[in-house]
Image: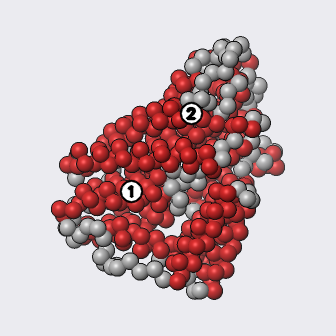
Amino acid sequence: MPVTESFILTDSMLIAAAILVAVYALVFSEIIHRMHGALIGAVVMVAVGMYFDFYTQEEAIESIDANTIFLLGGMMMMVGMLKETGGFDYLAIYIAKRAAKTPIRLLVLLTLTVSLVSMILDNVTTVIIFAPLTVLICEIIDLSPMPYLVAEAMLSNVGGIATLVGDPPNIMIASAAHIDFNTFLLHMGPVVAVVWVVTVTMITVMFRHELTPPPGYTGIVNLDESKAIHDVRTLKRVLAGLFIIVVLFFIHHHMHLYPSYVTFIGLSLTLVMVRPDPEALLDKVEWPVLVFFSSLFVVVGGVESSGFLQQIGNAIASVSGEPDRLLLTTLFVLWGAGLLSAFLDNIPFTVAMIPIILSLESTGINAAPLWWALALGAGLGGNGTHIGATANIICVAESERCDIPEARITPGMWLRRGFPVMIASLLVTSLIFVLFFDFFL
């Protein structure tokens, strides 16, 4: 499809977009639980899609990213088994003893750790591990986990941009553009470092009241972490399974294995060694989160099937066509990907943009900056709303399980804090592109 094709909205596109907006209205208003809203929207999208002949049941099933769903489910079971051993309690007490005297220092330490781990594991896996740990730390020192959970989700999204394996869109982009691991890190690492500092600074300012220690707060933890672990045997076996998963995460793309399959290799071996009660194990899975994401995939799949995402991608790319407008195109892709990824899943949008950028490349234009812009926009845009990234939903769900009412992360709260962070990140990234554009060529 030519990238200069005019922007035409069909009835199917308008209907699909209207259903998407209605679903987001339900999710953001919290009139009903987000899972219910997404599930109703998925059913309506399929029914309307079949009636207007732009979406089928088969396409709806195919739109569900099974890799993401199985990855989430598998890691939830691994983390559930780990929590039962007291391993998280040990780590929580250890960290609290060394960083809890200053809440801001604790936030910086946790977010730095999460960002670095997100460069090795994917950001979703990282948050699944660290979110419950963070709640435990905050319970020990009597602080609200809300700012820490929000910060961890945002900084896991930022950290995941730095490497080829940190975020699913990165893998797709690297595959399409034939970018290797080291090249990806070389170009994205410096940008991520700058954005990381800006993001942490903004978060500490916006959450300054929540991060101010209450009267009488000392941060002293009089607990012995060595007594927290009550099942050393199971702990060692679960850690062995996690070690296998982490090692395979490093090399899974070379072996042409999905991250979810890698997760289930480690999970299967762990189940053989630990042999937990199946019903108790499945209770550790956050089923509402999995159903929410599956439903949202179906809704966004309908929007994609209608051709709406393709039209948006064409509109973004059509500002170019000439090499002397490459910087403008790069910025347009960055902001388009960022703003859309705050409300749409970044995977379908990335899928829609890849052939468009490839077609630009085939005309002789150096498309390298466009690939970097797409990766950055898709990753940074996820910080804009509480449903902009999978990691965000994990942290929101974790906050809802807390007994502290003020710890709950609401859609409005995230929008007020996350959207400015997203805009600032995109502005800083735009400035880097303008000043160092030759570096990205």
Q: Position of residue 352 (x, y in %)?
A: 43, 68
Q: Residues within 10 Å of mark 1 (few under 14, many from 20)?
A: many
Tell me which residue sits at (62%, 30%) in the image: 210
Relative height, residue 241 to residue 384 (above, below):
above
Identity, as a three-letter code, of the amino acid under mark 1: Trp
Where disc 2 sits, the SS reads loop
Q: Is residue 352 left or right of residue 213?
A: left
Identity, as a three-letter code, of the amino acid under mark 2: Phe
Q: Is residue 304 left or right of residue 36?
A: left
Quarter of the image where one finds residue 315: bottom left
Q: Which residue is mark 2?
A: 207
Q: Is residue 300 left or right of residue 171?
A: right
Task: Depth check: give the residue in front, 121 or 275.
Answer: 121
Quarter the N terminus occupies: bottom left
Identify the disc placed on residue 335.
1
Relative height, residue 319 to residue 85 (above, below):
below
Q: Position of residue 34 (x, y in %)?
A: 69, 57
Distance from disc 2 to disc 1, alpha carbons, whole Å, reads 26 Å
Where disc 1 sits, the SS reads helix
